Image (cartoon, rainbow, N blue to C red):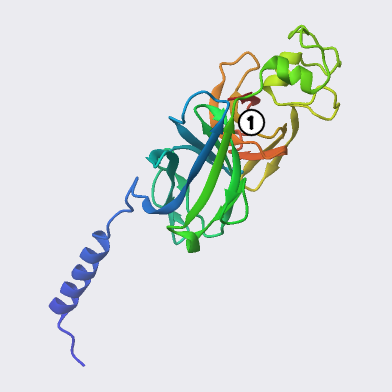
Amino acid sequence: MNIDPRRLRFSILTLAAIVLHIPEPLVGAEIPEPGFLMFGTISYSGVGLAPTNVEWQISSSSSSLAVNSTLVVVNGQTFYVATVPFESRLIGGVSIGSPTPNTLPLDAVPTTYARLPTVNGASSAIIYASSGVSNTFTFGPADRGRVERVDLSVSAPSTFAQWLAQYGLPVNSDPNSDPTHKGMTLLQQYLAGLNPNDPASTFKFLGIQPSRQGLQIQWSSADGEVYALEQATTLAGPFSLIQSNIVATPGTNTFVIPAAPTGSALFLRILIQ
């Protein structure tokens, strides 16, 4: 069989041109996905004002975000609608760009998220969820576009004096005192949502250990709280934000952060938002 060398050369050049013109992966081209929609009624008492703002704090062990809601009043009843945004960040296991701010990743394996609503800045209670699960939800590829009814109830938050009375302490107690010897002032315990009479009710780091994804951080947490995690290379700071809007999963929260470079110092602190 005779092969024309000019045809062979043309074929090789054509193949080379095809190879050289394979497009590069798109940077910042994450794929928006149908998200998770929540809606429901808002019941309120003792607050003094009708709901004007409903915000959801959503978090897993590696990501978090805040979601604002749209409010609608029908026949005197206030309803909210909130959409939790998701996006695909991997194709065939390969990253296709940097994460979009305030958006959650749609992972191949369903992920469980903690959720906490606030109404006019005050924590509110979930009184009904059509899924049957109130303070968490699980979302994966099969849940694209899922809709759930979640009804809320909000009342006026307890004052410092009411909190003292709840735990049998004098309502005129010095907020900077520590009568229960827990190493925190009464005001700090009030803000952290702790029980001053329970030695096990604390706000502290419980563990820091390596994991496959980085460093696994654990701390004690209280119902209804939202946390922010910060880091610094020296104890004096300055500290920079790692993640905010981390919803409490009482009594222990777990969050994974990227590991620090080998040989470098890392200081962490947790803030109550």
**Residue at 67% across, 21% down:** 191
Q: How many marks?
A: 1
Q: Is residue 88 shown to the viewer in this render? A: no
Where is residue 13? Give x, y as percent.
Answer: 19, 68
Relative side of 39 to 191, left or right: left
Q: Of 139 and 92, which appears nearest the observer?
A: 139
Instruction: Answer above or below: position of 74 versus 176.
Output: below
Image quarter in which the C terminus is found:
top right
> Circle 1 sits on which residue?
225
Q: Is residue 72 shown to the viewer in this render? A: yes
Where is residue 183? Give x, y as percent.
Answer: 81, 16
Q: Quadrant of residue 60?
A: top right
Question: Label 1 sits on what residue type?
Answer: Glu
Q: Of 30 and 234, which appears nearest the observer?
A: 30
**Residue at 74% across, 8% down:** 176
Instruction: Answer above or below: position of 122 versus 72.
Output: above
Image quarter in which the N terminus is found:
bottom left
Where is residue 269? Give x, y as percent.
Answer: 65, 24
**Residue at 19% across, 69% down:** 14
Q: Of 165 and 243, which appears nearest the observer?
A: 165
Query: Are there few (<14), some (14-19), or many (20+) residues within 10 Å of tag 1?
Result: some
Element on which disc 1 rests: loop
Q: Quadrant of residue 46?
A: top right
Where is residue 262? Give x, y as percent.
Answer: 63, 34
